[in-house]
Image (spheres, rainbow, N blue to C red):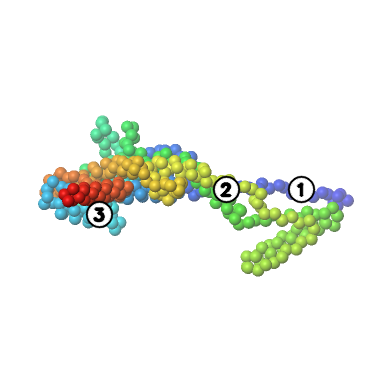
Amino acid sequence: MGFWNKRKAPAAGSAVQIRSGQRHPFGLLDGYVPLKNGEIQLYRSIREAVPVVDAAIWKLIRLAGGVQVRCADGGGQKELDRFLRQVNTGRGQRGLQSFLDQYLDSMLTCGRGVGEIVLDWSKKEIAAVLCGNPADVEIKEGDSPLQFTLCTRQGAALKELPWQELLLFTPFQPEADNPYGVSLLRSMPFLTEILLKIYQAVGMNWERMGNVRFAVVYKPGGDELDGVWAQERSRQIAQEWSAAMQAGKDGSVRDFVAVGDVDIKVIGADNQVLDSQTPVRQILEQLVARTGIPPFLLGLSWSSTERMSAQQADMMTSEITAIRRGLTPVVERICELWLRLHGYSGQVEVEWEDMNLQDLVEEARAELYREQAKALRENNQKAGAE
């Protein structure tokens, strides 16, 4: 008799994960701790994640380009120029400028540039000038800062690289206790992590609210019959609603008819999406300021009257000049070795091309004013002679 009076055991509740576990694809930016070579992958992730940072570095590289070398021995100048244009730099590239672009890219991103001068089998000609991966090279310091050796790590031991005199190493903005140099992106991981979280949240909100989802709620009445058939009616409502939505995807219109107290709402319609313009701009201002490039050169129109002023042009010129000072010793070492291998004097002078900034416009305008003043003086002299 107790069998019919036995109550059904209540269904066990299941945990519901209402928040998606998705994260932005650059998880290395979370929990960053600098460990010498470990941060190189982090800096490359920053460039890949934030296009503005990547564009700024490429603009610095392009603005710093354009080098010419003059040797003291006039007889070797023509051959030296040919070498600078045709030297093999690997991966199908030729010319010293392509090597300097890769080298400077490594300096700005990783904090140091590593290269190698490759001689041919006769040891009388430079066959190639190649860039290396800074993560594969470590420094073994000697008794003084003037003594250091480039090494590679094999397990727990350091192995000195052969032909140290043919290796190139340049730290970018080195500190007293850091012989490896400092990356241009060193101060960006924290802000970049926040920026990516904002973009990730914006994308998820648009996915939720752009692709509209509906909540169909059926409320049974007080009648006992409604309570008995509540599950069956809910199943029929869900089936008809799904058919109506599928018909809309196919381009046809289908009405949805339900009996009873049915409430249909758009999920998320009552929520307000946070304005991301202000925090994103504040973060981008910090990132762009680190590169030293005016924002409008990167496509950021934060002011309708923005233009390159004389002060900004001077600051950009000083930034590029400082970068070129780091590359000049590398160019000198390569050219001096080439000259000595060919029997010429090893003295060279590195000349960089003028930067194509507003200073060229100002020089042209000054030249126009001088010509106009000269024409006025000539007219005044003619008028006085008459």
In the foreground, 286 or 374: 374
User: For the residue marked with disc 2, what is the amino acid?
Assistant: Gly
Between disc 3 and disc 1, whose residue precedes? Answer: 1
In the image, residue 129 lies at what x, y percent?
25, 51
Label 3 crowd bin: few (<14), some (14–19), many (20+), radius 10 Å? some
- Specify few, some or many for label 1: CA neighbours under 10 Å numbering under 14, 14-19, or 20 or more: few
Which residue is identified by label 3? 95
Depth-wise, is mark 2 or mark 1 nearer the camera?
2
Callout 1: SS: loop
Contact check, label 3 and label 1, Cβ < 8 Å: no
Measured along the vertical axis of the image, is residue 111 above or below residue 220?
above
| Residue 184 appearing in the image | yes
Q: Position of residue 253 (x, y in %)?
A: 67, 67
Say which of marks 2 and 3 sits in front: 3
Give, as a three-letter code, the residue at label 3: Gly
Mark closest to the chain's N terminus, 2 or 1 = 1
Residue beneath label 1, please?
Answer: 10
The residue at the point 30 percent across, 38 percent down is 139
- Mark 2 lies on a secondary structure that is loop
Mark linked to residue 21: 2
Q: Earlier in the sequence, mark 2 or mark 3?
A: 2
